[in-house]
Image (tube, grey):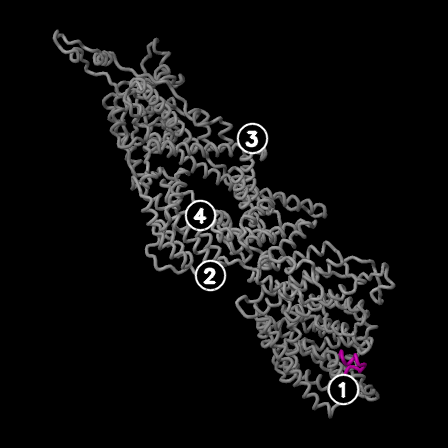
Amino acid sequence: MSSGDEDAAPSKPITPAAKPAMSRFLRTAGSDSSSSDSESEDEDESEISEDEGQEKKKSRFVHGGSDSDASDEEEGKRVVKSAKDKRLEEMEATGKVMDNALKINDWVAISTEFDKLARMVQRQQNVAEPVPPFYIRTLAGLEGSLNAALAKEKEAKKKMNASNAKALTAMKQKVKKTVKEYEKEIKQFQTDPEEFERAYAVSVQPEPVPIKDPRRTKKAVDDGDEEEEEEEVDDDFTTVGKGGKTMQFTSEGIFKGLQLVQEARGKKNTDRSEQIRILEKLLGVAVTSYQRIRVLLALVSSRFDYNASAATHMPASAWLSAQREIDQLVSIIASDPSYTVQEVTDDYDELEERTPADSPGGVVRIRGSIISFVDRLDDEFTKSLQNIDPHGTDYIDRLKDEKGLYCTICRAQAYYELSEQPDPLARVIMRRLEHIYSKPDAVVQALESSLSASDISPRVNLAAQGSTGGLVQALCIHLYKGINSLLRTRAMLCHIFHHALHNDFYTARDMLLMSHLQESIHSADVATQILYNRTVVQLGLCAFRCGLIKEAQATLQDIFTTQRVKELLAQGVHQQRYQQVLSPEQEKAERQRQLPFHMHINTELLEAAFLVSSMLVEIPLLASIDSEELKRKAISKPFRRLLDFADRQTFTGPPESTRDHIMQASKALQDGDWEKCRDLIQSIKIWSLMPEVASVKEMLAKRIQEEGLRTYLFTFAPHYSTLSLSLLSRTFALPLRTVTSVVSKMIWNEELAASLDQAAGVVVFHRIELSRAQQLALSLADKVNTMVEQNEKALDIKLGGGGGWGDRTDGNKGEKRGEQTQERRGRGERRGVGRGGARGRGARFAQGLGNQMSGQQSQRGGR
Amino acid sequence: MAEALAASLPAPQAAPTPAAPTYEAIPASMSKVIDIEAEIPVTCVQLDGLVVTKIIKHCRDAPSVSSAHGLLLGLDLDGTLEISNSFPLPHHVADDDDKSNKSIARYQASMLRSLKEVQSDDSVVGFYQATSMGAFFSQALVDTQAIHQDRLRHGGIVVVHDITTTARGTASFRAFRLTKAFLDAYKRNNFSTSSLISHRLTFSSIMEEIPVKIRTNALLSSFLTTLTQPSYSPLPDVSPVQAVSTSLPPSFSTLNLGTPGLTKNLEQIIDSLDQYKTEEGNLAYLQRQIAREKMRADSYVAKRKEENAARVAQGLAPLPEEDISRMFKIPHDPSRLESMLLLGQVDAYAKSLAVTSSAGLVKMYAAKASSGV
């Protein structure tokens, strides 16, 4: 109805919540000081986009202040003037501002003022008053000056800036439209202005006092709510006024009101906060359960509607009320089994009250979905955590709400258990599981403790299961029984994660291997892949904590070789690389995927664990091989790279970062200086983040001693013909038994050409030195071997049949071939996809790990 | 080097014809064997003793194997290429090409002139190249021979002398020329996979071997015979050791248990395998590059086709088919010549390794048997 609003709306890309407050602020300022211009508007706009949340509060505050000022002022005036006169005066003031703006050729200001004027006139008409001649006069004058300005603009091209010119053309359109509307009046006015004014005076005179004071209506409508525009008042005026607003908020009018709200939903000009307010009112007057359920359903969904854009999160207060209302809803339905909320129901008349008595089966089915509310509530919670600075107190405060959320989820679970709806029950259990699987026991206990207070509680809870492990197990088992395979997969991963978190490495590993997830994970959705990556990483950490260094190294290796740890764990956005640029949508999707901060696995700790385990695996290995050729085949490329880099450094200062510590420790280990190595490793600060620091450090010290011994033997064996075991045990502060067992193991594994002389307590080294020709012959054999393999592969590709080799070869070889072809296929796929998208990336990691795992498995089988 | 040689060589038709107007009547007995138009193909190469000794001496003295090369001079007669003389060419290391090329060309021209002045043979019929372990395949050799074959009468030949076997007591001379198929591919400068297949080229079909004869004049042969004939001491009371004396005592070097060239041979075969691997890697990389480009082009074409179909369905004029080759620079198929030559080298090394090691094995068995273990 007011053209100005619609024109302005698309041009301002700010949040709808902030906008009305803004324009209101501008308006009051304009009428007071008559100096609002485009500059101030631009400034404010940029400020808003800079800091939305703050600005919202601020503007609200400013606005509130000016509002009360204005009303005070008007209060004073009201004593002497009638409302009509006041409106006229207001119009004239606006006209004056327009005149002023016209003088300085400021079309932006003119445009806003004109919009305001049009609104006033509109209101005038709403109260059935004739259009004042002043408006017609201004209109006619404006048309003339507009034409003049346009003509001038044509001559002098460079004079106006862009926004001004835009405003000018917009004005042209508007004036044209309005002039057409009031064609008759203008003609009258132009023929005889005096006569026209007189006619107006006459028409006004006999009228009684105007029906309503717009000021008062407005006050009535938006008493609590500030974020409202005056034009919206007109809007609401029509809506609310239809049935008389006192009439509306009664239990009889509820369904009508609901329908009105529902119709307005999703429309462009609907004021969402107003709707919420109306619904709240309706809830207040709702008496029957049916009414309350209906209103609550509408209210919660309109709360979720509050934010139009998906990028921003719900304000905490709105979220809290939504949570409260969902709770309320659940308790209503749960307490009264004659009402159910279902996603699919028979059609029913929205405007009629329904009771269990007149419904089929004595159960009133209402259309709605509590599970989607819960889902949405949880998502909004995550979203808000993603957006809050994790290092501030806000984040902690927000995190406290998780307890309530968890409680809500459990209540929903309890409800679904009662009403026996398996599908939503599985979903809600999954939600619950996701809240607890990665948390330490204490936190889970805290979350669970809130349950006892609620009126309904799910069957599975901590008190019943005794331990968090039992709780997770019980939840997972429920999901395993379900039919939804995605939920099963996720439950499995959560379960494994939980085992890993509780240092139950073997169970976790066996579950992971038995699930065969590594084979199919690359076809899963991204969120599940992230969960998979998290699980694998946690498994690696678990192995590390348990002192299973080799397993830890092997598990963590894959994710570290990708060099995108953060990205794969969804703890940081993808680094832009030169060859691929993400589209904004992809980037947005990736950002939405990020885990909230409190769920993060500390990457620095992860790296420390990985590098230390790499060190313990790699350094003895490095010492054991002597030819350059073999050296190039590193087990852990990231570690080797760092080590090479550290080797190239001319000067090394005291260690600062974790990496420095580990690199210097590695060097010390290479030199056989295990004490220094141990001290360096133990002085890494990040260990403090690991649970059971002391035992982990102790374990590391023991490993360092053993690996130090191995490294020493590898490095210095050529210089001895015999070596006393007791000397070794003294040097490495290890008991004689351990030394003997380490040495024996090395001899057994053919890593050390030596034998043990038990009687004398010495290691006797045997030296076999290969002649040059022998060495060369060996390496030739190697090379020829690789060449043959290469040829076979080439032939394989040429023949084209992926399964060709696998089919033809039989027995043991078939398996290997199969692996090869799979690998090759993987490569082809990689080439085909062209490194597109995050899915491909995740898939690659997952796939690599899959191969690794299956390899391990077959090893285990072989043992 | 190849260019230098080419520059210094006489034009192909100039070589045989200058004497044409002053021909005296060719005796009837010879008319069949002298072919002025080079119609009789060369079936045999005959090396003079002089040439053999000269080549051996040059190759042994040369600082490195690859640097020892020179020109062969001679004439062909009734299908036999008689090589009567040779001279080494200087080898410049790490000089700038242009300069060294020029100086080589100058040296060669002046050498030929000097030889002509002393009424010696001065027509170039090919060149010789020293090599070790029989691996003579190299880009330079192929290039030079290709130029020779283009310009020389009868195409010219290359004589390869293997110094390793010579050091073991069996001098090895082999004569080669490029096969027709290879020359064809070479002229087109196309060694892509498809071309290799269509020309049926492998490393063994790059060159064809021509049998070599070594000719010594009667005087020299009789001298050599006397050298090997033992002479019995006329004195009656000499010890058995001194009773028989030869000027060239029999050599028992073949019975030496050590295998002198083995390490070297292994090193070289590993080296060339490595080179081959790198070359293969390059090829694979290029291959992938091509495949990727092709895929892009194909997808573009498919998209365009689809678009056109849609346009036609809508009743619009189809978009023009654009020149894809201009939009997508699809690189040419990579040349596999280098990898083929490397394979040839590997093969030669492997053969020589097989010879050495089998001899070594036989010796080992012999030693074992004789030691009675």
Q: Chain of mark 3?
A: A
- Give the SS element for disc 1: helix
Decide: is A138 above or below B161: below
The N terminus of chain A appears in which quarter of the rendering? bottom right
Q: Chain of mark 4?
A: A
Residue A569 appears in which quarter of the rendering?
A: bottom right
User: Which amino acid does the dot numbered 2 rest on?
Assistant: Ser
Is there one chain holding both mark 3 and mark 4? yes
> Which kind of residue does numbered mark 4 sit on?
Lys
Q: Is residue A555 above or below residue B161?
A: below
Residue A156: tell me if it is visible.
Answer: no
Crowding around mark 2 (Cα neighbors within 10 Å: few <14, some 14 to 19, many 20+) is few
Cα distance, mark 2 to mark 1? 74 Å
> Marks 3/4: CA distance?
34 Å
Q: Earlier in the sequence, mark 1 or mark 3?
A: 1
Q: Tell me residue A610's x, y (percent).
A: 46, 52
- Is tag 2's residue or tag 1's residue first in the polypeptide sequence? 1
Res A811 label = 3
Q: Are marks 4 and 1 on the same chain?
A: yes
Q: Residue at label 2?
A: A688
Of callouts 2 and 3, the N-terminal one: 2
- Mark 4 = which residue? A637
The image shows residue B282 at horizontal and vertical percentages of 45, 39
Report in which chain the residue with disc 1 lies: A
Q: Provide residue A58's location: percent of width, then percent of height.
A: 60, 77
Magenta part of the chain: A121-133
| Residue on which the image places disc 1 | A84
Q: Secondary structure at mark 4?
A: helix
